Image (spheres, rainbow, N blue to C red):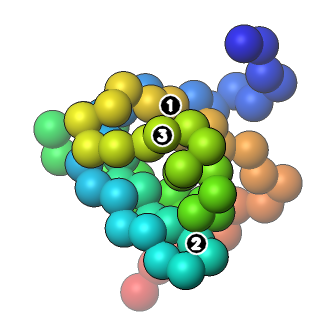
Amino acid sequence: MEISARNVLEGIVENVEVGAVMASVKIKISPTDIITAVITRESVEKMGIKKDDKVSAVVKSTEVMVAKD
């Protein structure tokens, strides 16, 4: 599969929490870093995403915000 996004982070699914409509997928991309993706329940079911699956987090955004205290 080819995509235009430049930010692709490979990792392992740590946890999947499925709600009525949405699902939270925690992806471990390094020993200390986890990304949480919120996707539809339908997508999780269609792709069969489960703990310990190898997946890619694809980040494509037109805006990035940075805040500092």
Residue at which label 1 appears? 56
Which one is nearer the viewer's eye here, 46 or 7? 46
Give the vertical position of 55 relative to 48 (above or below).
above
Residue at (70, 27) in percent of width and height: 6
Label 1: few (<14), some (14–19) or many (≥20) C-alpha neighbours in 10 Å:
some
Q: Quadrant of the N terminus?
A: top right
Q: Please tell me which of labels 3 and 2 falls first in the chain.
A: 2
Q: Secondary structure at mark 1?
A: strand
Residue 28 seen in render? no
Closer to viewer: mark 2 or mark 1: 2
Q: Please tell me which of labels 2 and 1 falls first in the chain.
A: 2
Q: Which residue is the extreme one toward the top? A: 1
Q: Please report contact status of discs 3 and 1: CB closer than 8 Å, yes or no.
A: no
Would you identify the image quadrant in which residue 26 lies? bottom left
- Disc on res. 36: none
Q: Secondary structure at mark 3?
A: loop
Label 2: few (<14), some (14–19) or many (≥20) C-alpha neighbours in 10 Å:
some
Would you identify the image quadrant in which residue 3 lies? top right
Residue at (56, 38) in percent of width and height: 47
